[in-house]
């Protein structure tokens, strides 16, 4: 996983709450990833979301 999420954690405080229901199998996969990377589940989700949004915005910038 990239360092974008780790950098964002240092820059911006976590003040917003998000509650979402996901399949148990997806949660298990995220928990495994967190254990493998020695991170919390929340950290892994934030990093993955940040990385995905960053990639999507880069792709969008190329189009326009």
Image: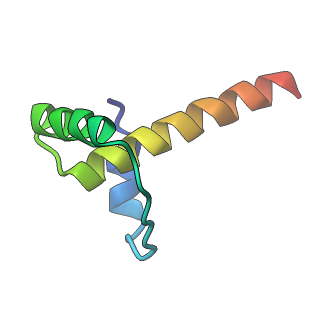
Q: Position of residue 38 (x, y in %)?
A: 10, 40
Q: Position of residue 40 (x, y in %)?
A: 18, 51
Q: Residue at x 29, y 44 (%)?
A: 44
Q: Position of residue 16 (x, y in %)?
A: 46, 74
Q: How is the image coloured?
A: rainbow
31 horizontally vs 44: left or right: left
Foreground residue among 34 and 14: 34
Quadrant including the N terminus: top left
Q: Residue at x 41, y 55 (%)?
A: 21
Q: Residue at x 35, y 47 (%)?
A: 45
Q: Residue at x 68, y 36 (%)?
A: 57
Q: Position of residue 14 (x, y in %)?
A: 38, 70
Residue 4 versus residue 13 in the image, above or below: above
Determine the residue located farthest toward the right in the rendered image. Answer: 64
Quadrant including the C terminus: top right
63 horizontally vs 19: left or right: right
Foreground residue among 11 and 42: 42
Quadrant of res 20: bottom left
Foreground residue among 58 and 43: 43
20 horizontally vs 29: left or right: right
Q: How many marks?
A: 0
């Amino acid at each position: 996983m990239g360092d974008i999420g780790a950098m964002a954690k240092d820059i911006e405080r976590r003040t917003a709450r998000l509650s979402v229901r996901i399949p148990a199998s997806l949660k298990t996969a995220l928990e495994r990833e967190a254990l493998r990377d020695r991170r919390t589940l929340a950290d892994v989700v934030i990093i993955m979301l940040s990385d995905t949004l960053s990639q999507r915005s880069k792709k969008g910038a190329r189009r326009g």
